[in-house]
Image (cartoon, helix red, strand yellow):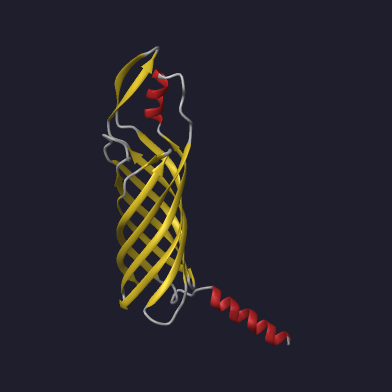
């Protein structure tokens, strides 16, 4: 019984720890839609593209970086597009099924940077209002990622992916914009605001 138990433990350990021959890499370039809300403002649906690389250290479980680029416009009259850049890390859990299609789940965390173009804001004080230009405001905030998808490998190493995820955000501040508002208004805006984004991606890549 002791020998049988030791054999089972060794077999389980062999399943969990990947040898160098078992290790593999997924490299994917994908594009799709993003629908964002940030600081109580809804953004129109925009385009997002993403690069990610995942390496397997354990069977089924992969880890690696991702970088995403998007340009979306606030759903406000006269607003112009805002560029967002995100860099982060994620884990991917593949579910081994027979055949060329495998489902997977993803979770991660990243740092997002928003570049807001020049914009005109109206400042009012003592019944008098004036317009002021806010120059190139920026915002930095944390992004979390959770979702899943499918990977199809028709002919190795070529792979196609479909992915959908939810990306809640926190810590959003827009320092330049808020300082301008505070200078002309007695009601200061909140120092930090939350948001979220829904993302759908179709990708092409290589899996080794």
> Residue 121, relative to residue 169: is it above or below?
above
**Residue displayed at 47% across by 37% down:** 193
Image position of 145 (left or right of 132): right
Q: Is residue 208 visible?
A: no
**Residue displayed at 43% across by 72% down:** 23
Q: Is residue 46 visible?
A: yes
From the top left corner, tell me how far across and down residue 54 is, in percent: 40, 64
> Residue 131, relative to residue 5: is it above or below?
above
Which quadrant would residue 160 be assigned to in this image? bottom left
> Residue 156, relative to residue 35: is it above or below?
below
Quadrant of the drawing holding the C terminus: bottom left
Quadrant of the drawing holding the N terminus: bottom right
From the top left corner, tell me how far across and down residue 149 is, in percent: 40, 66
From the top left corner, tell me how far across and down residue 117 is, in percent: 28, 34
* Tally of numbered tags: 0
Q: 197 or 15: nearer the eye?
A: 197
Q: 28 or 13: nearer the eye?
A: 28
From the top left corner, tell me how far across and down residue 192 is, in percent: 48, 35
Q: 59 or 147: nearer the eye?
A: 147
> Residue 125, relative to residue 193: is it above or below?
above
Which quadrant would residue 153 be assigned to in this image? bottom left
Image position of 3 (left or right of 152): right
Q: 3 or 72: nearer the eye?
A: 72
**Residue displayed at 29% across by 21% down:** 131
Which quadrant would residue 145 be assigned to in this image? bottom left
């Amino acid at each position: 019984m002791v020998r049988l138990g030791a054999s089972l433990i060794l077999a389980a350990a062999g399943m969990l720890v990947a040898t160098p021959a078992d290790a593999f890499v997924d490299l994917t370039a994908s594009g799709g839609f993003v629908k964002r809300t940030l600081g109580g403002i809804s953004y129109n649906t925009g385009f997002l593209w993403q690069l990610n690389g995942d390496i397997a250290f354990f069977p089924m479980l992969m880890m690696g970086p991702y970088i995403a680029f998007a340009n979306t416009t606030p759903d406000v009259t006269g607003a112009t597009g805002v560029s967002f850049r995100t860099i982060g890390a994620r884990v991917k859990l593949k579910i081994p099924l027979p055949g060329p299609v495998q489902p997977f789940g993803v979770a991660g965390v990243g740092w997002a940077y928003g570049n807001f173009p020049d914009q005109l804001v109206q400042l009012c004080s003592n019944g008098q209002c004036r317009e002021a230009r806010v120059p190139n405001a920026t915002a930095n905030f944390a992004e979390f990622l959770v979702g899943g998808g499918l990977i199809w490998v028709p002919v190795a190493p070529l792979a196609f992916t479909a992915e959908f995820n939810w990306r809640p955000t926190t810590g959003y501040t827009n320092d330049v914009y808020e300082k301008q508002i505070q200078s002309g208004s007695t009601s200061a805006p909140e120092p930090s605001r939350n948001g979220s984004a829904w993302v759908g991606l179709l990708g092409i890549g290589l899996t080794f």
